[in-house]
């Protein structure tokens, strides 16, 4: 089978040919219909050799959806041909967090060597993907796997962050989304579907701001050194009750802190390496800062249910598997408007 792998530190991903995997006891073989391309992959491939935490070569792709092609002994509740989405942040299934369905916060995954597909374990950017347990597969139930595959991360991650702040996003409140790309443009739609808040989107690119307006942002602001002042002007000097930073670089994190209202929430979601200090006179009073990660299995089910209502429309660009290196080039150059999706089987 063909697969897209990161094979050498500092090198571009490559399309290679690998043996087709065979499912063992409890495992499910998925014929991959779609795999998302994410900035997390760019971050992973930028780590130097002395900091790289995984074994190479690594098949990429932590967003996956496809058709059940087979399964090993002991698998129940699935049939060949079922269309499913893959839950990425897979945990041990036994610790206290996993017992709550929060496998994204598994307490034992690192110790047991359990990694998400594409982020340590073989990923979905291949013609076939081996899934270790059927509990990681959620039925698509009528959703198009190509259009819905980004929901497994680009939908789930902002949903998890937004859900924490829902009590503060009441009528008259404001939510700020920093970065209107793959995750940010979905976050805007989630905020519009789940809250009555005014949504202000920030980005450095005018085409991303246009995308933000097209999916429901009430206001858009160029993300530059004047962005915080502009958001303060738009909110009458009060700031935003919730700020979601999908970039996470130091300048955007600083902006997030500067525009958070008294008792506001700041969620630093992006992997840009920035940090926001917390203390008296560093932000408005009683601002809460969090660094949420992905989301729970139950939350993914909720995101898929919401998508079935028509509330979410992920903007995608599709590429064949041989074009995957080009998709990464475009993503790195910030030329992807929305989410890039690889179609491993055409």
Image (spheres, rainbow, N blue to C red):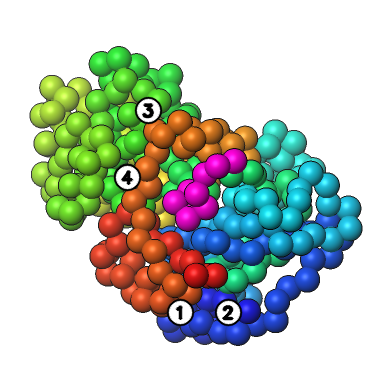
Question: Badges 4 and 1: C-beta atoms under 8 Å apart?
Answer: no
Instruction: Tell me which numbered mark, 4 or 3, is placed earlier along the sequence.
Output: 4
Residue wearing tag 2 = 2
Q: Which sits earlier in the primary sequence, circle 3 or circle 2?
A: 2
Q: Nearer the viewer, mark 3 or mark 2?
A: 2
**Residue that mark 4 sits on:** 185
Can you give x and y, in whole percent of width and height, for residue 16 in the image?
Answer: 56, 84
* In magenta segment, residue 262: no
Quadrant of residue 324 within the rendered picture = bottom left
Q: CA distance from mark 1 to mark 2?
A: 9 Å
| Element at label 4 | helix
Lower sequence index among marks 1 and 3: 3
Label 4 or label 1, whichever lies nearer to me, is 1
Q: CA distance from mark 3 to mark 2?
A: 39 Å
Cβ atoms at labels 1 and 2 below 8 Å apart: yes
**Residue 251 image position (x, y, % from top left):** 25, 52
Q: Is residue 94 left or right of residue 255?
A: right
């Amino acid at each position: 089978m063909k697969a897209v792998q990161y094979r050498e530190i500092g090198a571009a991903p490559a399309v290679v040919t690998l043996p087709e995997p065979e499912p063992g006891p409890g495992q499910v073989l998925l014929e991959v219909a779609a795999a998302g391309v994410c900035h997390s992959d760019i971050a992973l491939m930028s780590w130097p050799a002395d900091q790289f935490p995984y074994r190479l070569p690594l098949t990429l792709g932590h967003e996956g959806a496809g058709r059940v092609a087979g399964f090993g002994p002991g698998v129940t509740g699935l049939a060949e041909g079922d269309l499913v989405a893959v839950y990425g942040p897979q945990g041990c299934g036994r610790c206290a967090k996993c017992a709550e369905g929060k496998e994204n916060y598994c307490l034992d995954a690192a110790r047991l060597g359990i990694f998400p597909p594409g982020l340590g374990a073989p990923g979905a950017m291949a013609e076939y993907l081996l899934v270790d347990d059927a509990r990681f597969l959620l039925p698509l139930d009528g959703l198009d796997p190509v259009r819905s595959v980004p929901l497994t991360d680009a939908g789930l991650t902002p949903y998890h962050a937004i859900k924490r702040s829902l009590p503060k996003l009441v009528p008259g409140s404001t939510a700020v989304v920093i970065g209107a790309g793959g995750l940010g443009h979905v976050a805007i739609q989630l905020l519009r579907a789940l809250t009555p808040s005014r949504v202000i989107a920030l980005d450095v690119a005018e085409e991303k701001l246009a995308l933000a307006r097209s999916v429901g942002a009430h206001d858009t602001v160029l993300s530059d050194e004047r962005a915080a002042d502009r958001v303060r002007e738009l909110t009458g000097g009060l700031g935003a009750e919730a700020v979601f930073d999908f970039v996470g670089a130091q300048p955007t994190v600083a902006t997030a802190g500067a525009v958070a209202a008294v008792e506001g929430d700041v969620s630093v979601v992006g992997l840009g390496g920035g940090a926001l200090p917390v203390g008296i006179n560093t932000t408005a009073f009683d601002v809460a800062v969090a660094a949420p990660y992905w989301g729970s299995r139950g939350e993914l089910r909720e995101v898929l249910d919401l998508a079935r209502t028509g509330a979410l429309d992920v903007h995608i660009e599709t590429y064949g598997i041989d074009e995957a290196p080009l998709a990464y080039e475009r993503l790195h150059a910030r030329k992807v408007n929305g989410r890039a999706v690889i179609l491993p089987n055409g």
